[in-house]
C-alpha cells in the first residue's frame, strides 16, 4: 500500500510539471477552432467614416410664421335716424361709396311744412324779444319779462334746428368711405328709427389678423413690418399696428393686426393668409432638420467633429423652422457638422471625416 501512495504522488508531480511547462514556456499558444484547425487572428476594427460639412454662422433675420386671415378694418350697420319711406337707393350692394355720400333717401313728406311753421314762429319770437329789449331799456318791462321773451325766442330757434336736422336725416349717408357689403332695405320700405339700411365695410386699410402664442407674443411689437401670402395668390406687406394685451379665454392666444394698403379694393376680406413677421437679427446656423440628434437625456442637438476628429454632441436652440431648413443657435461660429452617419457614432468616438460635397445639409 505504501508503494501505491508513492506512485500516486509521483504521477501527480509529473502532471503538475507538464501543466506548468505549458503556461510559462514563453511560447504563445495557438487557439484552435471547434473543428481542431488553428483559429484566425481577429483584426482591429477600422475607424468609422462619417460625412461632414463645414457650416458657418451667418446674420439672419428671423421670421415668425402664422396662419391668419384678412378682415375689414371697420364694419358698420347704417341705420335710420328718423322714420320714413325709402324713395331712392343711391348705391347697390357691392358698390364702393365715398365718405358722406348718400346711401338712401327717405320721403320728406310734411317736414318742409313743419319747417316753414317753425321759421314763422321764430320770426315772431324774434320780434317779441327785440320789443321786450327796447321796453326794458326804457324801464317799461321787468327783467323777468325780458328773460321770458328771450327763452321763447330760443325755444323757437331750437325747433327750427330740430326740423333742419330731421330733414337732413332723410338722406342716409355713409359714415366713411368703403364698400356696401349688404343691403337690408329696398325702395318703398318704411323704416322706423334704428332699422338697418345697409352694412358698410372699410377695406382700406385692410387688416391681416392672426393669433400669437404666449411664447410668440413677446417676439413681436407694434411697428414691425411683415408680409402675407393670401389664398388668392396675392402677396402683400404691411405694418403691425395692434397687439392684444389680454389673451383669448378659449385659446390662450393674443390677437394681432397688420395694416395693408388696399386703396383699389383689390383684396377681399375673409381670405386665408400665411403671415411672415420679421422679428430680430441673430447670428445663427441654418441646416436640414435631418441632421438633428437626441442626447441620452433627450436634449435636441447635432453631432460635430472636433479638431481631434472626435464626435461631439452639442445641444442647440431652434430659433426658426423654415421651409428649406431650421435656424439654430448655440453652436460655435465654424463647425464640421456630421451630415451622414451621425446615428452610428457616439460622443467622444474617433472617426474618419469625409467632406460631404452634396451641400444638402446646410445653407
Image (spheres, rainbow, N blue to C red):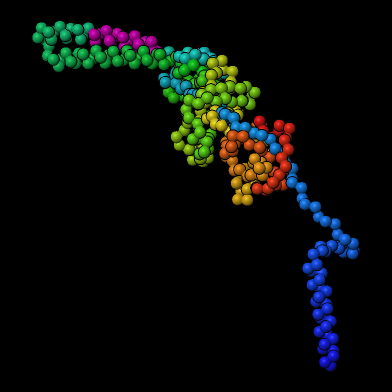
| Total tally of numbered discs in the picture | 0
200 left or right of 28 in image? left
Picture layout, residue 170 above or below residue 308: above
19 left or right of 78 in image? right
Q: Nearer the viewer, residue 72 or 328?
A: 328
Picture layout, residue 136 above or below residue 360: above
Residue 291 x, y percent position in the rendering: 67, 40
Q: Residue at x 48, y 25 (%)?
A: 223
Picture layout, residue 180 above or below residue 115: below
Quadrant of the rendering where the C terminus is positioned? top right
Seen as rendered, the residue at the extreme bottom is: 1
Q: Residue at x 62, y 34 (%)?
A: 334
> Which stretch did the figure color magenta?
109-126
Residue 338 x, y percent position in the rendering: 68, 40
Picture layout, residue 229 above or below residue 15: above
Seen as rendered, the residue at the extreme left is: 139
153 left or right of 257 in image? left
Quadrant of the rendering where the N terminus is positioned? bottom right
Residue 78 x, y percent position in the rendering: 47, 22
Q: Is residue 104 visible?
A: no
338 left or right of 114 in image? right
Quadrant assignment, res 182: top right
Q: Nearer the viewer, residue 9 or 172?
A: 9
Residue 53 x, y percent position in the rendering: 69, 35
Q: Would you say residue 46 sits in the magenta stretch?
A: no
Q: Residue at x 14, y 16 (%)?
A: 144
Q: Nearer the viewer, residue 328 or 136?
A: 328
Q: Nearer the viewer, residue 133 or 325?
A: 325
Q: Residue at x 42, y 21 (%)?
A: 81
Q: Is residue 251 visible?
A: yes
Q: Specify the principal SS of the magenta part.
A: helix
Amino acid at each position: 500500500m505504501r508503494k501505491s501512495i508513492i506512485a500516486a504522488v509521483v504521477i501527480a508531480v509529473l502532471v503538475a510539471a507538464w501543466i506548468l511547462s505549458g503556461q510559462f514556456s514563453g511560447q504563445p499558444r495557438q487557439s484552435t477552432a471547434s473543428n481542431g484547425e488553428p483559429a484566425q487572428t481577429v483584426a482591429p476594427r477600422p475607424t468609422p467614416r462619417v460625412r461632414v460639412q463645414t457650416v458657418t454662422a451667418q446674420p439672419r433675420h428671423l421670421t415668425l410664421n402664422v396662419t391668419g386671415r384678412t378682415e375689414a378694418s371697420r364694419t358698420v350697420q347704417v341705420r335710420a335716424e328718423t322714420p320714413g319711406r325709402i324713395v331712392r337707393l343711391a348705391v347697390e350692394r357691392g358698390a364702393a361709396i365715398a365718405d358722406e355720400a348718400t346711401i338712401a333717401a327717405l320721403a320728406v313728406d310734411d317736414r318742409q311744412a313743419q319747417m316753414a311753421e317753425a321759421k314763422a314762429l321764430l320770426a315772431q319770437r324774434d320780434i317779441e324779444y327785440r320789443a321786450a329789449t327796447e321796453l326794458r331799456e326804457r324801464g317799461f318791462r321787468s327783467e323777468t319779462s325780458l328773460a321770458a321773451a328771450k327763452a321763447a325766442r330760443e325755444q323757437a330757434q331750437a325747433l327750427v334746428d330740430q326740423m333742419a336736422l330731421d330733414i337732413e336725416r332723410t338722406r342716409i349717408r355713409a359714415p366713411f368711405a368703403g364698400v356696401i357689403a349688404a343691403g337690408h332695405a329696398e325702395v318703398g320700405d318704411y323704416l322706423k328709427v334704428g332699422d338697418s339700411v345697409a352694412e358698410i365695410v372699410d377695406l382700406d386699410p385692410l387688416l391681416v389678423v392672426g393669433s400669437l402664442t404666449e411664447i410668440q407674443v413677446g417676439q413681436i411689437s407694434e411697428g414691425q413690418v411683415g408680409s402675407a401670402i393670401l389664398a388668392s395668390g396675392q402677396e402683400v406687406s404691411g405694418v403691425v399696428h395692434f397687439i392684444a394685451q389680454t389673451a383669448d379665454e378659449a385659446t390662450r392666444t393674443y390677437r394681432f393686426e397688420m395694416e395693408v394698403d388696399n386703396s383699389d379694393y383689390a383684396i377681399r376680406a375673409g381670405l386665408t393668409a400665411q403671415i411672415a413677421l420679421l422679428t430680430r437679427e441673430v447670428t445663427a446656423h441654418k441646416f436640414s432638420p435631418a441632421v438633428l440628434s437626441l442626447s441620452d437625456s433627450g436634449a435636441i442637438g447635432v453631432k460635430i467633429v472636433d479638431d481631434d476628429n472626435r464626435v461631439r454632441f452639442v445641444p442647440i436652440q431652434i430659433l426658426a423652422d423654415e421651409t428649406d431648413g431650421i435656424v439654430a443657435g448655440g453652436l460655435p461660429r465654424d463647425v464640421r457638422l456630421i451630415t451622414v452617419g451621425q446615428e452610428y457614432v457616439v460622443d467622444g468616438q474617433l472617426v474618419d471625416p469625409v467632406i460631404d460635397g452634396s451641400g444638402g445639409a446646410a445653407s
